[in-house]
Image (tube, rainbow, N blue to C red):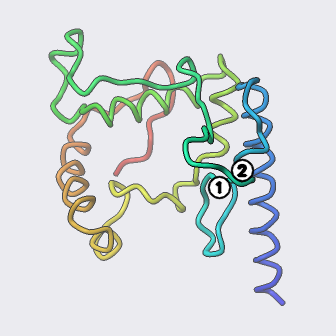
Amino acid sequence: LLLAAAAATADDAAIIEGRKFAILLASNVPDQNPGKVALARDKHGVRGLIAAQPFAAGDVLLAVPLERCLVETRDLPAAMKNAPAALTWDVRLALQLHDAILTPDDPFWVEYGTLLPKVEEMGLPLLKRGAELDVLGPELAEPARQQRPAARRAPRGPRRGRPCPPPL
């Protein structure tokens, strides 16, 4: 009985997430047909975008307007020439996302942040350790192992009055 209740709760959460995604998509990408794709969980419980209707090769599944994209160059911008080496493009991009979801100026990003996986559900290699990391294979595990010490050395402190992310 408890297992059935837990499954029902997970199903309810997945339905709510799916509805929130459809609303976010419809309100921010007006030319998009929100019925084409859905945020859902597969039969193994893995969350992702799934096709909600049949598609032919070459069909556009989801178009994201450029103004809704967070963009970061691979090379360190000249204005940041004195930044620590740990501030790689992916870390800078993660910081942009962090700032965007915690800034109430743009409701899109605030709502998008509610759709992100909870920390305990994250599959990011940088957040995994030991056997969990090994399972990902060397292509993902090695860069995560190399980035972890650099991320620990990165300067900490509130960014523009916002709280810091938890330590690695």
- Answer above or below: position of 43 versus 57: below
Measured from the top left, where is residue 51 in percent x and y?
67, 53
Residue 134 spot, x, y in % from top left: 27, 72
Instruction: Tell me which numbered mark, 1 or 2, is placed earlier along the sequence.
Output: 2
Place residue 30 in its image quadrant. Answer: top right
> What crowding class fits label 2: few (fewer than 14 Cα within 10 Å), some (14-19), or many (20 or more)?
some
Circle 1/circle 2 CB separation < 8 Å: yes
* The label number, if any, that marks residue 50 in the structure image: 1
How crowded is the residue under tag 1: few (<14 C-alpha within 10 Å), some, or many (20+)? some
Task: Report whether 100 appears left or right of 112.
Answer: left
Q: Quadrant of the N terminus?
A: bottom right
Q: Residue at x 55, y 26 (%)?
A: 100
What's the amino acid at mark 1? Ile
Between marks 1 and 2, how big is the CA–CA gap?
5 Å
What's the amino acid at mark 2?
Ala
Taking 138 as reference, is 5 left or right? right
**Which of the 4 quarters of the picture holds residue 12?**
bottom right
Q: Is 150 or 157 nearer to us in this picture?
A: 150
In the picture of the structure, the residue carrying the numbered disc 2 is: 38
Q: Residue at x 64, y 36 (%)?
A: 112
Q: Give SS at disc 1.
A: strand
Is 82 left, or right, of 59 in this rendering?
A: left
Compared to 34, does 14 lie above or below?
Answer: below
